[in-house]
Image (cartoon, rainbow, N blue to C red):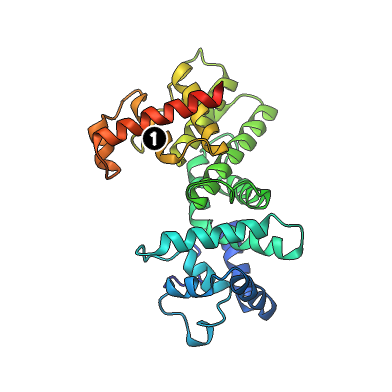
């Protein structure tokens, strides 16, 4: 089981502060009792214990925040996806409330997503233009908390953690782009785009779209050039909006964007990556295109 009571301070700064605060929360009897009550009320106690090997006997019937985080970060994939999705949806529903427990639920979500937030922050850091790790980390954590409290995620299909990360990244990109606009030339866009004729605002928007698409798994490979504009960029935006609205699943989005990428993935390769057949993948894409088209009518 991951050491959630004394997590590694891998990033320093704000993330280390969050880890230290988490240790204090886990030691608070009132917080432990609140989390235990949540799990009992939502009938998730047995599910949490089932995916947290090594839970102390005293916590097996009354799991608290440490056990909850261990379940959400479990490495046992045999039954973890169903459990973690259910637990995270439960937390997101509670975080959308307006009482003190909603703030605590959002805090648990933030702690759960710290590994993703660290990766997200590193991806947005620039060696110039004021985008230091700590500056971006502050924006990322604030965005994550805001998205967790928004009430938008738990009603969507698909994996809630993926939706949470996608919304957070889009929020971060908007905030960073707005900050760059206020301070003048978009230096990050100048770094990402070599075309001197590219408008800085358009470059920033394209960068944000490609970053969000990468988090959603819409690019066929990890390292994709963010230079495509025009129709392909518009398609990416439309697919992201459809994912946000629940019109398409992430698999539907990949079926469309992988096919219409600058480096298209063949149906045979795409099917192999998704454990299906080429014919089934092609039919998924056709249905996804039809749903996307209908949503635009």
Examine the rendered structure and indicate whether residue 221 appears above or below residue 22. above
In-front residue for pair 288/16: 288
Residue 19 sits above or below residue 172 on the image: below
Q: Quadrant of the N terminus?
A: bottom left
Q: Hey, which quadrant is residue 220 in on the image?
A: top left
Labels in figure, total = 1
- Give percent across and percent down for residue 45: 53, 74
Residue at 53%, 33% in the rendered image: 242
Q: Can residue 46 be seen in this view?
A: yes
Q: Left or right of 142: which side holds 100?
A: right
Residue sticking out furthest to the top? 197
Left or right of 125 in this view: 280: left
Q: Name the residue under label 1.
A: 254
Left or right side of 277 for 20 = right
* Quarter of the figure with residue 272: top left
Q: Residue 115 at what x, y percent from top left? A: 48, 56
> Is residue 249 or residue 139 the one in the foreground?
249
Q: Which residue is drawn at 48% across and 87% down?
A: 57
- The crowd level at tag 1 (other Cα within 10 Å; few <14, some 14-19, many 20+) is many
User: Could you tell me which residue is drawn at 49 percent across and 75 percent down?
Assistant: 46
Front in this rendered view, residue 244 or 293: 293
Task: Please state if 165 lies on the left or on the right of 290 as rendered.
Answer: right
Looking at this view, name the residue that lies furthest to the right.
99
Secondary structure at badge 1 equals helix
Q: Report the front residue among 297 and 45.
A: 297
Residue 160: image x %, image y %?
52, 51
Which percent across, then down, holds residue 149?
Answer: 67, 52
């Amino acid at each position: 089981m991951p050491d959630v009571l004394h997590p590694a301070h891998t990033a320093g700064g704000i993330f280390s502060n969050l880890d230290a605060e988490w240790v204090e929360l886990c030691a608070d009897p009132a917080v432990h009792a609140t989390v235990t009550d949540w799990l009992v009320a939502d009938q998730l106690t047995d599910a949490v214990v089932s995916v947290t090997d090594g839970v102390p006997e005293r916590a097996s019937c009354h799991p608290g925040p440490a056990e909850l985080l261990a379940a959400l970060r479990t490495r046992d994939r045999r039954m973890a996806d169903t459990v973690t999705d259910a637990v995270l949806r439960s937390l997101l529903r509670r975080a959308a409330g307006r009482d003190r427990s909603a703030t605590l639920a959002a805090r648990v979500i933030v702690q759960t997503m710290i590994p993703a937030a660290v990766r997200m922050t590193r991806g947005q850091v620039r060696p110039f233009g004021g985008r230091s790790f700590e500056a971006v980390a502050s924006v990322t954590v604030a965005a994550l908390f805001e998205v967790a409290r928004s009430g938008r995620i738990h009603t969507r299909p698909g994996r809630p953690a993926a939706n949470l990360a996608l919304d957070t990244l889009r929020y971060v990109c908007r905030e960073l782009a707005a900050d760059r606009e206020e301070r003048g030339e978009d230096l990050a866009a100048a770094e990402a785009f070599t075309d001197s004729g590219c408008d800085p605002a358009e470059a920033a928007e394209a960068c944000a779209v490609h970053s969000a698409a990468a988090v959603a798994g819409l690019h066929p490979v990890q390292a994709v050039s963010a230079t495509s504009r025009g129709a392909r960029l518009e398609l990416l935006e439309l697919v992201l909006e459809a994912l946000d609205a629940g019109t398409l699943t992430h698999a539907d989005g990949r079926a469309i964007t992988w096919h219409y990428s600058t480096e298209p993935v063949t149906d045979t390769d795409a099917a192999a990556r998704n454990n299906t057949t080429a014919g089934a993948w092609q039919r998924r894409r056709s249905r996804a295109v039809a749903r996307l088209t209908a949503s635009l009518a």
